[in-house]
Amino acid sequence: MKTASLVLKYSFLGDAKYVTKVSVIHEAVAGVDMYGVIPDQCSPAVLKSVYDSYKEGYQLAINGDRSWIAERKKRRAELDKIIFHLGLFIQMVCDGDLNKLLKSGFDVKMPRTGSGKSKEPVAVPA
């Protein structure tokens, strides 16, 4: 049986929404024991540090300077890796527990329940 899972990539979000999403994830996992000991490479402290660096790059790139835009992209790629690994860790620890997944700050994907077609015939009025 399939269980709920986390959305691990947010490349579809623009920078402003991405900043908000990462902030929500950080606030949800920082200081919470529900997920056990989070590995160092994706710990809340590392997430916060790289997030702050990305936010700075985001603000500096607003003026259109090409070097800052390139730096912002580099910092976002680094943050994407941390978010991805943190999400995998949380997903593993939660083992399908929907309540824990929802509290993580990540978006949750629900498993498909079928094709939407009824397996039993439906009587159609004449």
Image (tube, helix red, strand yellow):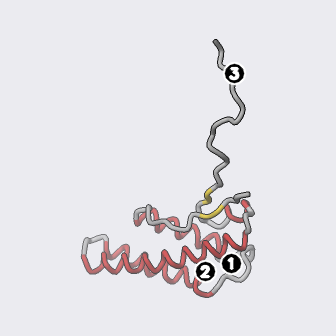
Residue drawn at x 54%, y 74% is: 83
Q: Position of residue 36 (x, y in %)?
A: 74, 79
Residue 26's place in the image compared with 124, above or below, is: below
Q: Residue furthest top?
A: 126
Instruction: Work out which quarter of the rendered image holds the N terminus and state it.
Output: bottom right
Residue under label 1, please give it: 31
Which quadrant would residue 126 be assigned to in this image? top right
Question: Tag 1 or tag 3, which sits nearer the N-term?
Answer: 1
- The answer to whether the residues at label 2 and label 1 have Cβ atoms under 8 Å apart is yes
Q: Bin the neighbour count of mark 2 within 10 Å (Cα to Cα): few under 14, some 14-19, many 20 and up.
A: many
Residue drawn at x 27%, y 80% is: 67
Q: Position of residue 84 (x, y in %)?
A: 55, 74
Question: Tag 3 or tag 2, which sits nearer the N-term?
Answer: 2
> Is disc 1 placed on a helix, strand or loop?
loop
> Is disc 2 placed on a helix, strand or loop?
helix
Amino acid under disc 2 = Pro
Residue under label 3, please give it: 123
Residue drawn at x 44%, y 62% is: 13
| Measured Cα–Cα span from mark 2 to mark 3 | 56 Å
